[in-house]
Amino acid sequence: MPVTIMIGAHWGDEGKGRVTDELAAEADITARFAGGDNAGHTVYVNGELFKFHLLPSGILREQIICVLGNGMVINPVNLLKEMDEMAARGVDVSPGRLLISTRAHIISPAHIALDKAAEKARGAQALGTTLRGIGPAYLDKAARQGVRAGQMTNIEDFADALHASIERANEVLIRQGITPLDSHESTIQYIEAAQRLQPYLVDTSVYLNQRLKEGAKVLAEGAQGAMLDVDHGDYPFVTSSTATAGGAIAGLGIGPMYVERVVGVTKAFSSRVGAGPMPTELDGPIADRLRGTGDNFWDEYGTTTGRQRRCGWLDGVILRYSAQVNGFSELYVTKLDVLSGLDEVKIAVAYEVNGKQQDFPPTTIRELESVQPVYETLPGWKEDISGIHAASDLPAAAHNFIKRIASLCDVPVKTVSVGPARDQVVALQ
Ligand code: GDP
Ligand code: IMO
Ligand code: MG
């Protein structure tokens, strides 16, 4: 391995949690490098359901050390809540097993209030953020007025920094006619959290580099997806971090020479939650079929917000683009089982823009909103594939579908999953 980077190929929720859990079996360290608790990563093991927002999804593998890297924005109260929940379920979240970068940024109550206020002000143009304060926290980081996790080592300094953050936010809130935050009241829990988190704070870049020199295997767990990346996604309908593979290097403080594998995770269809263009979005029976009724935990309803996800056929144009900007060395296709029973399945292989076909998405929102997907229709398969373990047992039509995905972006599909559980996996090569 030394470093394997795992990235969502579309707009998030591709099944990164389950893939991380699987790849972590071969790793020593699982590290998150971007985003915060806007992420919702699901892992289903031995009939137990786990949803991770800040903790790396490799945490269920006993040998794994978990790292929250410098590229993250961390809500300390929500992190402790998640840690306590995991501890109650018998998961080791002690210092030494979980390391938090002193350089990671803190999401304060001010950031959450500002996220809500900004969405309200956008009205009909709202981005549909997760309201976790992600954008305002990264904004403060870029403006060089953020609060870093390392400041939690000095409680007085930390409290002052939080209060200053709230005072700045209150000026904005008052201008918008929103009730300002009570600086003391809203920070009590944060200050308590800081005290508890002190033993976890480490220079994780120094730690990771030392372990890599000793031969440790690191799994970098992407959050969100390539199309939500602040540079490469469909700006402005994106998150505020670098969710693509390059973000793993900057967000962990390691060199690119360690990277051996970049695993792109895609669902067998496309989904998006929140606003923004989605060229293959469907409305009607196929979309309902892909989304599911909500009765199963794997149906397409947000892990973090519970929102219904928009669904449509697999967007191969986005996948091809994503393979390029991330440098995928292999693909992992999830939720293949969901396509079982359909007479035919479709993949968008190009877009028609102003009467011309193109292989990559246009860079302006106006154009992306007006593209017409060019679909290729492939035969479906009727068999229930959720119990299949060997590639040779997959129906020919499923093999055909997978082969087309690989040829579309010139990246081999190495694994498919046929259900949410650990053993519902088929290795292809
Ligand atoms: P993430 O954000 O990329 O980790 O994805 P989420 O956890 O938000 O959403 C993916 C959902 O699909 C979760 O409920 C998973 O349990 C589920 N899932 C993952 N792989 C498969 C699969 O192969 N088949 C089915 N049916 N569900 C899957
Ligand atoms: P995982 O890691 C799906 C979306 C939000 C919104 C946009 C900006 O589970 O795949 P933000 O709160 O980040 O400012 O919201 O990004 N979004 C996600 N969509 N999965 C996620 O994470 C997401 N994280 C953010 O819905 O459209
Ligand atoms: Mg998710």
Image: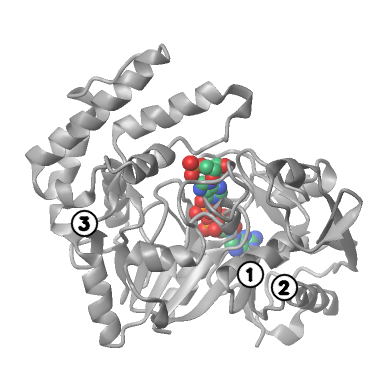
Q: Which residue is mark 2?
A: 409
- What amino acid type should be assigned to the residue bearing mark 2? Cys
Classify mark 2: helix, strand or loop. Answer: helix
Classify 10 Å Cα crowding around label 1: few (below 14), some (14-19), many (20 and above): few
Choose top left, top right, bottom left or bottom right for residue 423: bottom right
x and y percentages locating residue 199 in the rendered image: 13, 57
Classify mark 1: helix, strand or loop. Answer: helix
Q: Which residue is mark 3?
A: 102
Q: Nearer the viewer, mark 1 or mark 2?
A: 1
**Residue 188, disc:** none
Residue 153 sits above or below residue 4 on the image: above
Choose top left, top right, bottom left or bottom right for residue 373: bottom right
Residue ID at (30%, 88%): 215
Query: In front here: 303 or 50?
Result: 303
Q: Are the residues tagged 1 and 2 within 8 Å (C-beta)? A: yes
- What amino acid type should be assigned to the residue bearing mark 1? Gln
In 3D space, how far apart are the residues under numbered discs 1 and 2 (Cα atoms)?
8 Å
Pick whichever of labels 3 and 1 is earlier in the sequence: 3
Q: Which residue is mark 1?
A: 324
- What amino acid type should be assigned to the residue bearing mark 3? Thr
Query: In front here: 363 or 324?
Result: 363
The reply to whether the residue tagged 2 has its Cβ within 8 angstroms of ligand 1 is no
Q: Quadrant of the C terminus?
A: bottom right
x and y percentages locating residue 53 in the rendered image: 41, 51
Q: Is residue 335 visible?
A: no
Q: Are the residues tagged 3 and 1 within 8 Å (C-beta)? A: no
Residue 51 sits above or below residue 61 on the image: above
Query: In front here: 325 or 227?
Result: 325
Q: Is residue 50 left or right of residue 101?
A: right
